[in-house]
Every structure is written in structure tokens, then in C-alpha cells.
Amino acid sequence: MATFDDYIQSLTLHSLAPQVADGVLAGNFLTHRLLMNAKRWDGETMKFPFAYRKNTSGQWYDGMDTLSTTRVNTRIRLSFEPRWYSHSVVLAGTDLDVNNTQAGVIKLLTTEMEWAQQSMADTIGDAFYTLQAGKLPQSILDITDDATDVTTYGGASRSTYTGLNGQRNSVTTLSVSAMGTLADDCSAGSVGPNLGVTTKAIWGYYEGLLQPTVRHNIDISGYPQATSDGVVSSKSALKGDLGFDYLWFRGMPICRDEKATAQSMFMLNEDYLAWYSLASAKWSQVPMGSSTIDGVYKKSPSKSFKFYWSGLREPQAQDAEVGFFKMGGQLISPNPRFQGRAAGITG
């Protein structure tokens, strides 16, 4: 490495790249997809009617037989409460003063706000693959469980109402037949899973099962891409959206998510899975940006993750600025029997 003394340093400025390199955050596919397609939260709690058994009051009859007038209760109500998460942006006024000069190549306020948003999305991604506890929201693990770890769902017992169980299978060695079994378990009639999510390692196992067919297709056009609201044939078709590599299985994309639970593959039905976003009554909704951070969110479209911003506030008797991002809502599947997890995959 070349070392320069005062002879050259006294006459030559250093150069600062115009973006901050992200060396921390990981891929966050499912969170990206859920938050970009959030549904609206209403009320104190969200309640969903759930039919746990069929109406058995029907009968075969002939002639003048007396018809049944028995009323059969077939439904319960699932109830879900919202959860909130916040992230602060704290800046000293003196730092803003110094940065607000011609030498401030990368704007401090913009960088801190964007990094807070992206850190927030990363933490939410962790929560979506962590069993619910304390003030965390429900996770994919809660939804796909079969009463092994999570005995109640929406306030109802999974042992009493077995239709509330997700499809949790034990799979040691990944195979096409094991994936087919999970897909079948998550299906009823024409309804079945339409999105697969797994770790990078297990995604690689599945890719190996498809050789050499997949390699031939990749050599021609590259991996197809899963986006926030669909799939496209190749990276060239993204048109500014953020794409994630996927492989097909039974007509559904299988995507890798660096947040996904180790040794697990999830098969989900997005028609029965959503983040229900609770709007802030006072704070302003803001878009997700990445103008100063060069990392995993660089190509994320300028659409909102349903984050809300308080605006900057000056603490009393301090030369500083403080602001807060927040997000409220809950991850809900009104019909968890269409959601599944293969756990324990080691090869």
C-alpha cells in the first residue's frame, strides 16, 4: 500500500465515495414481499370467522319423514391484536452544521434516516421468523405450527380446533417427494401453496435435485426473478424492481431468504397470508429509500413499507434533532391449514 507524506497530502484532497457501503444487512425476501403488499388494519382487534367443522344437520329422507331442525354451531372467531415497532434517528446539531457544508459529500440526515429504515426492515425480517413472544408480532413459525410449539392461534386452542394447525412435517433429507408431500398437506381441492421460501443452503439442495435441466435454462436466460408482487422471466424484465432468484416447483416459485429459519422450507399460500398494517393517526407515511446506501435495498422501488415518520423534534435544552419511524400491525393467516413448514432438513 502506497504511503504519502505531507509533500503530496498538503496539496491533494482525499476522495469520498458518494454512497455508504452496506456490510451488515442480509437478504430479506419475505419481509419485502409482505410489507409491499400489506392489507389495512381496522379497529382494536382484527377478528376472522373460522369454520372448524361442517354442518351435519342434513339427512337423506323420503315420503313424510320429519326433517331435522337442529342448529349446528360450525364457527368460531379468531382474534388478533396489533403490534408496534419503532426506530429512532438521533443527530447532534453540531454534526449537522459540519455536514451542511460543501465538504459534506454524503448528507448526514438522509443517510441516517435511510439506514434507520433499512435496519428497521432487517429487524422486522428477523421477527417474521421468530416465535411470537412478548411484544413481537406473529411469525411464519407461529402460523405454520401444529401445536408442537404454539398451542393456541387467534385465541383458540389448536388441540380443540385442529383446523387451526399449520402443516409441519419432519424432513431430514430434502427430496422432490418430500416437497410434494408438504405441498399436498397444504392443499385442499384447488387451493394450495403458491410460494416457497427457504434458506440459501436448502435452496441449493433443491437446485441440485433439478440438475442438469436448471443449469441449461440458467445458461440461456439466468434465474427467473420473484418481485414484490409477482415473478418475471429474468433480471432484464425487472424494470427497476428488486428481484430475488427462484426455482419452480409445481407451478410455485421457491425463493431463498437469508432470514429464513435454519433447516426449514416453508410453503405458503399468499391468498391467506398478509401483514395487516395499522396506519398512524398523527405521523406521515414515508417511502422506502436507498439513495445513499449501497446494499441489499439499493434497487428497492420507491414504494412504502408502511413506515410512518414523526418528523424531527428538538429536545429541550439540547442542540439536537430526534425523530422516530414506526410500523404497526400484525402478521395474520385467517386459514393456517394452507401454510406449511418442512423442518429438520440437513441435506
Image (cartoon, grey):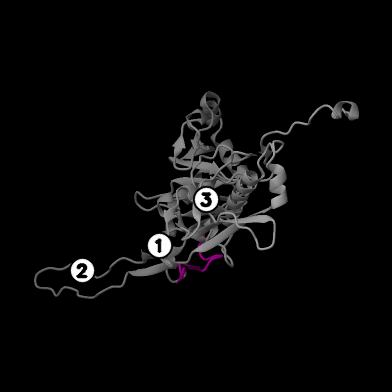
Q: Which residue is mark 3?
A: 266
Left or right of 44: which side holds 307?
right
* Residue density around tag 2, few if under 14, some if 14–19, many if 20 or more, within 10 Å: few
As measured in the structure, the alpha-carbon distance from the residue carrying label 2 to the one carrying label 3 is 41 Å
Q: Residue furthest left?
A: 63
Specify whether 103 is left or right of 154.
right
Secondary element at tag 3 = strand
Quadrant of image for the C terminus: top right
Mark 1 residue element: loop
Residue 333 or 157: which is nearer the viewer? 333
In front: label 2 or label 1: 1
Contact between labelled residues 3 and 2, with CB atoms less than 8 Å apart: no
* Residue 59: mark in rendering: 2
**Where in the figure is residue 67, as x and y percent of width and height?**
16, 73
Q: Horizontal and vertical percent for residue 53? A: 34, 66
Residue type, label 2: Gln
Residue ID at (52%, 24%): 220
Q: Earlier in the sequence, mark 2 or mark 1?
A: 1
| Looking at the image, residue 321 lies above or below residue 101 | below
**Structural distance between the alpha carbons of marks 2 and 1:** 41 Å
